Amino acid sequence: MSATLVVRGISELATCDPRRGDAPGVIRDAAVAAQGAIITYAGPSSGLRDVDIAPHAVELDANGTAAIPGFVDAHTHIVWLGDRSEEYAQRAAGVSYEEIAARGGGIMSTVRATASANLEALTGAARMRAARMLQLGTTTVEVKSGYGLQHDAEVRQLEAALALDADPALPEVIPTYLPLHAAPPGPRDEFIASVCTEGLRQAATLARFADAFCDQGAYSVAECERFLRAARDAGLGLKLHAEQRTRSGGAALAARMGAVSADHLEHAGDGDLRALAAAGTVGVILPGASLVLDGPPPPGRRLLDAGATLAIASDCNPGTCWSESMPLMLSLAVARAGITPAEALQAATAGGAAALALRDRGILRKGMRCDLSILNSPRWLDVAYHLGDHPVSTVVRGGAIASS
């Protein structure tokens, strides 16, 4: 098969391939070739002589800089309207997350601004955030609903996410239905019943996963289990916000239900993390939100020590982590979650793919999707080491240049 894309001159290729030995599986003086969206070669530059290259192939020269897999950001809320900057100032002045919510702020503030918006407005706002994500090296992003409450508003958020997915200059989008996010204004039981019937009927045609916020002030274990069981029956994969503000029992529920991931986990006990590992549930840490809310450190090291698969995600949202930068999340994870830069890169690529049940990306190896970022540094370590930098010069998504 003739290669349609060749990347030469890579100083360090961080493959994140466990077959390459110690993380992140670095190959020095490396090259990558792809036919269409699929990698046909990833290895030493000398091996390119055995690669058949199509006459009109796109050839990129990394000029002695490093390359890494595209980031897989497995937890975001980028479809929103409205502004919550005043809450940021209030938290800095000592007002708690719970107090802000009780005053009508928090998630409900975003619901009021987002639920009435049309599809065009939602898509336009989310498009700008997704474009920044891609420029910073994210090639796949999970996008949740959750700021609608009413079924038609939740559906519009999912439709906006899918509209982004149609643009090859943006990350590929994985939509998630998150109706149990903010507390409903009316009777809870009636709301949950409608979500488990009419809501899932509509969402199952648009989303790949279902999610719920299991915590004090949000939804109980019993309420979340009721919804997750209905979602599973509707054919959706399961995810769960768990143990973010309190130890609610969400991690144990995620393990018991065989969820693909449990996310946040700052208040999870070691037994909770071992249960996730035994269930094959990926632990997704969100170091930006943990920092902004001044919570316990994300349990990165504890998840790895428990034997669980670790993922890092941005949690990009208007209230607790407005950041599209996965490189920044790696820096924060190294600083606060007790993990090494190599473990952080693995978690943001292969780990993120595992948290979305995607087996075709997150690793640079023959047969995988050709999603990669060429850096502006010869060292892959600079992704996390150069705090707050824009480390990416060129992004390849599905074997084609998406940003340069």
Image: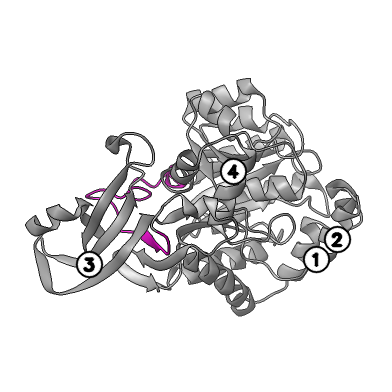
Q: CA distance from mark 4 to mark 2?
A: 24 Å
Nearest to N terminus: mark 3 or mark 2: 3
Disc 3: which residue? 5
Dominant SS in magenta: loop
Under circle 2, the secondary element is: helix
Disc 1: which residue? 85
Nearest to N terminus: mark 1 or mark 4: 1
Position above or below: 12 against 17? below
Q: CA distance from mark 1 to mark 3?
A: 43 Å
Amino acid type of the residue that numbered disc 3 sits on in the rendered structure? Leu
Q: CA distance from mark 3 to mark 4?
A: 33 Å
Under circle 3, the secondary element is: strand
Disc 2: which residue? 89
- Count neighbours of disc 1 (C-alpha within 10 A) and say few if under 14, some if 14 to 19, many if 20 or more: few
Position above or below: 223 against 127? above
Nearest to N terminus: mark 3 or mark 4: 3
